[in-house]
Image (tube, grey):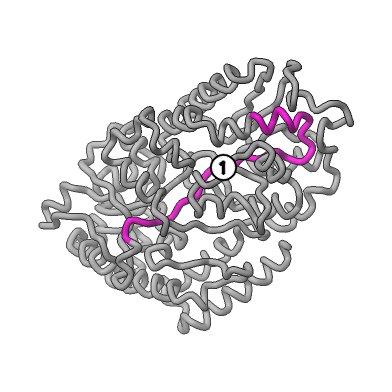
Amino acid sequence: MRSSSRTAAFALCTAVTASLLAGCGTTGSGGGGADIGADDTTPVTITFWHAFTSDRETAAVNQALALFHQKYPYITVNSVKGQTDDKINQAIRGGTAPDVAASFNAGNVGGWCSSGAFQDLGPDITADHVDLSGIPAAVQDYTAFQGKRCTMPWLADTFGLYYNKKLFAAAGITNPPRTMSELAEDAKKLTAFNPDGSIRTAGFMPYFGGYEMLTEHLVPSWGGHWLTPDGQSNTAKDPAFAQALTWQKNLVDWFGAAKLKTFKTSMATEQSAQNAFETGSLAMMVDGEWRTAFIKGDNADVDYGTAPMPAADDQPKLYGAGYVGGNVMGIPKGAKHPGAAWKLLKFLTTDTDALVTLANQVGNVPTTLPALESPKLTLTEDPHFQPFLDVFKNPNTTTTPAAPDGGAYVTNFEPFAEKWQDGQVPDLKAGLAQVDQQNNAALKLGQ
């Protein structure tokens, strides 16, 4: 899995999700017949779509499916890789939906739940007495919408700080920063410029859009909440947003926005073996837990450490927390075998061995607390990975909650943040109020 936020771009928003029900196939068995695989052992084949594509990832999925088949030998799963949200939505509209669909993009959950494009899992959860208390609150937030749970979490991305130990030692820095002031100070110590004034080594990338330096990964350090309890945009009312942007802009100004933009352009693509952190030209960065697997797979010559993202200076209780997002899985409207589909969905998202098997192979955080505590979770043997497991479990860890606009309240913030860092926003408070106004219009349209 890659980033659950921006690198797996928000797909088809309000207009599409609102129209998904038009032209959908029937629910249940698809023809009014028996729900094969629900309460009997009649052999049945179901279709499962997921977005994984690499040989390593699909092999891991197949291992988890093999465990499922051992438990339910009468259910055969036709697993189809590389399926996007666009394809899922098109299949739902065309009446050819798979029985189970998994997505990298939790941003679409609000639209899927509110439109009925994904079926309500509540009755099945209640009937099978599925205990959701083993899923952290932040994870429950991005997999349900307005009390309706139409998806379950299936592995998570958790974000933290990566730092280059060799560069730290050369700069006389002994420990990773715990506060945002320390992060800024360390970034300056670690930065080196070329004779012409351009950046040779960046201590940190504060410029939005530089790899995983995104607003949703920064704001949790101040405890920000994107939406109010009643689902309205909250960026102007919550002081965390202005505080986070002010910190960010001060560091951008120290570097020089033009210099950072040039440096950002010179950075190799994020998933490349020439990633700027892996080659040593970026001393610290915010990134997801999957980077540990990439560094190992790329045979990168970098001596590094990982830690939680620093917290705002006046909120030390937030140190150890961070941002979490991840894969989601549901039963689309029109699924021909919803009973068997529920068995597969419940197994893949709640069975400890299935989650641990997939997490170990893919390198993502398993999404239940029992899986995190499993002795079979070999990820715990890697000291680089442990901080992400701790962040995931932290009760102060937050997410971008599901919304009917397909997550547009976050993507709408991006162009404003870009103007802000380039000095094109004269009044931050007024600008945030305008963002809220735009977001609220999108949120209302998506309802």
Instruction: Kindly tell me whether residue 413 is visible in this rendering.
Output: yes
Q: Decide: is 33 above or below 224.
A: above
> SS for tag 1?
loop
Give coordinates of residue 18: x percent, y percent: 76, 55
Q: Residue at x 38, y 43 (%)?
A: 289
Q: Residue at x 32, y 37 (%)?
A: 295
Give coordinates of residue 39: x percent, y percent: 74, 25
Q: Nearer the viewer, residue 85 or 274?
A: 85
Q: Nearer the viewer, residue 83 or 180?
A: 180
Q: State the residue lying farthest toward the right.
A: 32
Left or right: residue 324 versus residue 86 is left
Q: Amino acid at mark 1?
A: Asp
Q: Decide: is 167 above or below 188.
A: above
Q: Decide: is 115 above or below 245.
A: above
Q: Nearer the viewer, residue 117 or 423?
A: 117
Q: Check the picture and name the quadrant holding the C terminus.
A: bottom right
Give coordinates of residue 304: x percent, y percent: 23, 44
Quarter of image, res 215: bottom left
Give coordinates of residue 305: x percent, y percent: 24, 46
Total number of numbered discs in the rendering: 1
Q: Nearer the viewer, residue 285 or 191?
A: 285
Say whether residue 65 is magenta. no
Q: Decide: is 310 above or below 55.
A: below
Say whether residue 339 is magenta. yes
Left or right: residue 55 versus residue 170 is right
Q: Residues within 10 Å of mark 1 (few under 14, many from 20)?
A: few
Residue underneath mark 1: 131
User: Range of the magenta residues?
Assistant: 319-343
Q: Residue at x 13, y 55 (%)?
A: 174
Instruction: Kindly tell me whether residue 197 is visible in this rendering.
Output: no
Q: Residue at x 39, y 53 (%)?
A: 394
